[in-house]
Amino acid sequence: MTAEKVYIAEQLIPILEKVSDPEIPVLSILEMGVVRSALIENDNVKVQITPTYSGCPAMDVIGDDIISALNRAGYQAKVELVLTPAWTTDWITEKGRRALEDYGIAAPLGAEADKEALLGHKKIVKCTNCGSRNTRLVSQFGSTACKALFQCIDCQEPFDYFKCLK
């Protein structure tokens, strides 16, 4: 799947880059790919965001954080939740994927690989601590519903894996 076109006014990018995902604070909402558009009309900004999955509890906090950040920058802001097209892990930027790994969360694999890993058929999820692929699924759900809990068999450390969503 190719990423949907995102429209963000250039002067808003530095502001939105400072708004982090409340569940993964090392990622900005831009790196996470939840911002679908951010447009300025006069001094009013309209931002459209798409949840990582329906019912994601972080979206209210993200919306409030966007409004606060834009208000501090002198803009009146409105945030709209957009459900179509559905968010996909393909929208996480490369910088975001690296930040996930550095933070200790394995970045999402492709859809088929994800299925093989979550069903325990292949050892392909890389440990974020030692880099080994000798890992095992502990639970389909990790610290949040969008993550699974894995453990490295080599170093024994637990870690989250961000599940692939397409």
Image: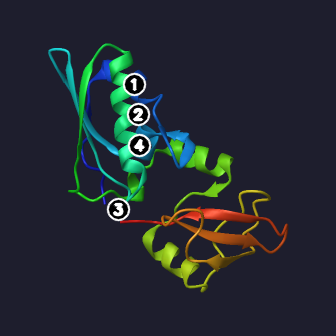
Left or right: 64 as drawn, with respect to 41: right
Q: Position of residue 4 (x, y in %)?
A: 25, 49
**Disc on res. 69:** 1
Q: Position of residue 77 (x, y in %)?
A: 25, 27
Q: Secondary structure at mark 2?
A: helix
Q: Earlier in the sequence, mark 3 or mark 1?
A: 3
Q: Is residue 35 above or below residue 154?
A: above
Residue at point 38%, 26% (across, down): 68
Residue carrying label 4:
61
Q: Measure the C-alpha gap from mark 3 to mark 1.
A: 24 Å
What's under tag 3, amino acid-wise?
Gly
What's under tag 4, amino acid-wise?
Val
Residue at point 31%, 13% (across, down): 74
Q: Quadrant of the C terminus?
A: bottom left
**Disc on res. 38:** none
Q: Secondary structure at mark 4?
A: helix
Coloration of the structure image = rainbow
Q: Quadrant of the N terminus?
A: bottom left
Mark 4 in CB contact with mark 1 (< 8 angstroms) = no
**Within 10 Å of the Cα at label 3, are there few (<14), some (14-19), or many (20+) other Cα atoms?**
few
Q: Secondary structure at mark 3?
A: loop
Residue carrying label 2:
65
Residue at point 35%, 62% (across, down): 55
Where residue 157 sits, quadrant-wise, is: bottom right
Q: Measure the C-alpha gap from mark 4 to mark 2.
A: 6 Å
What's under tag 1, amino acid-wise?
Ala
Mark 1 in CB contact with mark 2 (< 8 angstroms) = yes
Residue carrying label 3:
55
